[in-house]
């Protein structure tokens, strides 16, 4: 049994070209141009550097670092490292894991097509189970995140690390939270709805609960407190 206090920081990538508002001349449609290769905007790079200053060099140097292979998550980690004042990646332990990629929305469609699918089909099949045409459902994403979590825990034991920094994507992070805290599908769907209605409150809740608590096998009471706090916040 892994008996060490565990601290995990989950960071969503900064603003990307795909996050720009409709009508912005720099906006890129990920369905037409390749989701994996979207770059951060200037604001997104600033956000990443600010996050690095907030996290701090000490935590980053002492952590296992995982990132999605998408350009925007690579660039976010670059900004975090720069913001923290770390001169070289050579002193860091960084792993790139495709299981942390964004949920796949399918190909050969426009963003409008994807939105129409979601609006119609999600109501019928459920947010968690709905699979994009040619892509994934949140349930599919959950499955790969679950295998990542087991790999991460084994690596923490091998490297004798108790801190982890993960740079990923919004839905993937929600799946991580769901698996790590053993939330129900209904909890997940409420979390997704909260993200849509109030992103700031959503992020504060997730960060506050995930940021630091004991691994649940060794401190069940604290794990239950964290899980209960998240569930209560969703109602």
Image: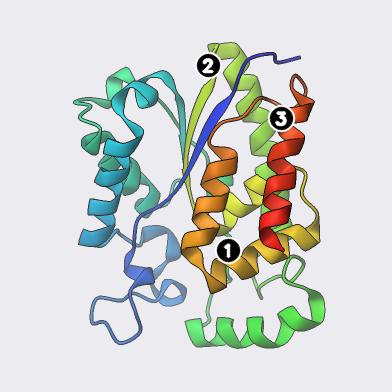
- Taking 59 as reference, is 160 left or right? right
* Residue in front for this viewpoint, 20 or 105: 20
- Where residue 66 appears, as percent x and y from the top left, is 48, 35
Q: Is residue 56 above or below residue 117?
A: above
- Where residue 162 appears, as percent x and y from the top left, is 54, 19
Q: In the rendered image, which residue does mark 1 sit on?
A: 104
Residue found at x 25% / y 53%: 45
Q: Please, what secondary structure does the residue beneath circle 1 have?
A: loop
Confirm whether residue 230 shows in the render.
Answer: yes
Confirm whether residue 137 shows in the render.
Answer: no
Q: Please, what secondary structure does the residue beneath circle 2 have?
A: loop
Residue found at x 42% / y 77%: 32
Q: In the rendered image, which residue does mark 3 sit on?
A: 222
- Where residue 188 appears, as percent x and y from the top left, is 71, 59
Circle 3 Cα neighbour tier, 10 Å, few/some/many (<14 / 14–19 / ≥20): some
Residue found at x 25% / y 44%: 49
Q: Is residue 171 above or below residue 118?
A: above
Q: How many marks?
A: 3
* Residue in front for this viewpoint, 102 or 83: 83
Which of the two discs, 2 and 3, sits closer to the camera? 3
């Amino acid at each position: 049994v892994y008996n060490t206090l565990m601290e995990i920081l989950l960071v969503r990538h900064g603003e990307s070209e795909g996050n720009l508002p409709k009508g912005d001349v720099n906006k890129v449609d990920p369905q037409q141009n390749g989701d994996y290769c979207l770059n951060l905007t200037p604001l997104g790079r600033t956000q990443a550097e600010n996050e690095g200053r907030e996290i701090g060099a000490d935590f980053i140097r002492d952590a296992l670092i995982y990132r999605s292979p998408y350009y925007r998550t690579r660039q976010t980690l670059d900004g975090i490292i720069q913001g923290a004042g770390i001169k070289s990646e050579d002193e860091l332990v960084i792993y790139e894991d495709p299981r942390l990629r964004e949920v796949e929305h399918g190909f050969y469609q426009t963003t409008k097509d994807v939105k129409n699918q979601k609006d119609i089909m999600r109501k019928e099949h459920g947010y968690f189970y709905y699979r994009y045409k040619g892509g994934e459902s949140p349930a599919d994403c959950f499955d790969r995140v679950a295998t990542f979590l087991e790999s991460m825990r084994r690596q923490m034991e091998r490297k004798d690390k108790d801190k982890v920094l993960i740079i990923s994507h919004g839905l993937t992070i929600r799946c991580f939270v769901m698996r790590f805290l053993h939330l129900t599908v209904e909890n997940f769907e409420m979390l997704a709805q909260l993200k849509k209605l109030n992103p700031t409150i959503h992020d504060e809740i997730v960060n506050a609960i995930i940021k630091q608590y004991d691994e649940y096998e060794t401190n069940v009471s604290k794990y239950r407190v964290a899980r209960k706090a998240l569930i209560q916040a969703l109602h």
